[in-house]
Amino acid sequence: MRLFLYNYSEDGNCPVTVEQRVFGASDDGTGTGEKAVRDLNVGDAVLVRDTCINYRDCVIHGACVIDGPMVLQHRDKSLGDDLLWPDEKRKRRIVYPYRWAVEFDSAPIVNRRRVDWNEFDAVGAIGKVHGLPLKGRRAWEKKFRGNLITSPGQIEALTRIFDLRSPKESR
């Protein structure tokens, strides 16, 4: 299982993702959407962090699994309404043009939704800019802006930190 780390900064977006079974990535100029388009495959798990409130800790909404190919909403218009999430409706424009069908039945169960940022220092993730291990809250907040984790060691460490379980283990 590969993990894609992503932030939801708008209150109400997570329930829409669950109800509509659609995950969307923004095209905000930071490259987040392009990274998602390049990196996400069917079967990848998306771990969604709650940034609606400036929590002291890392707080996770939950997880979903990519269940279909990417759809470009401007062009394909096939995954729900153009204005699907609350911030899209408020702004009256598509904010998350890159969209994927998702499912929750095989998504990892997040048993530990609130984690102190200092715990991430043990993951061993290497930053792209300086090639040094990621340390501290700021570095990990950036990592949650749409990054795919493929290293088995890092996936194992994040699995431990969030106490991720397969749905089969939780039964």
Image: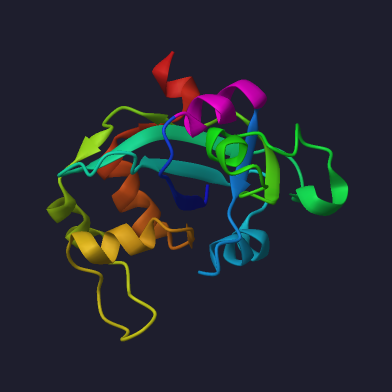
Scheme by which the image is coloured? rainbow
Question: Relative to 15, does residue 23 appear above or below in the rendering?
Answer: below
Q: Is residue 53 left or right of residue 45?
A: left
Residue drawn where x is 43% and y is 63% of the image: 151
Residue drawn where x is 28% and y is 60% of the image: 140
Q: Nearer the viewer, residue 134 or 75?
A: 75
Q: Is residue 101 left or right of residue 136?
A: right
Tell which residue pokes out farthest to the top in this image: 171
User: Which quadrant holds residue 35?
Assistant: bottom right
Look at the image and give the residue range highlighted in magenta.
12-20
On whether residue 17 falls in the magenta region, the answer is: yes
Residue drawn where x is 64% and y is 43% of the image: 43
Residue drawn where x is 61% and y is 50% of the image: 95
What secondary structure do most residues of the magenta stretch adopt? helix
User: Which quadrant holds residue 110?
Assistant: top left
User: Which quadrant holds residue 90?
Assistant: top right
Q: Nearer the viewer, residue 171 or 35?
A: 35
- Quarter of the picture containing the C terminus is top left
Q: Is residue 47 left or right of residue 18?
A: left
Question: Relative to 66, does residue 4 appear above or below in the rendering?
Answer: below
> Can the viewer see residue 125?
yes
On whether residue 46 falls in the magenta region, the answer is: no
* Percent position of residue 5, x then y: 44, 52
Q: Nearer the viewer, residue 25 or 113?
A: 25
* Percent position of residue 167, x then y: 48, 23
* Percent position of residue 13, x then y: 50, 33
Question: Relative to 31, does residue 157 appear above or below in the rendering?
Answer: above
* Percent position of residue 162, x then y: 29, 39
Q: Nearer the viewer, residue 36 or 165?
A: 36
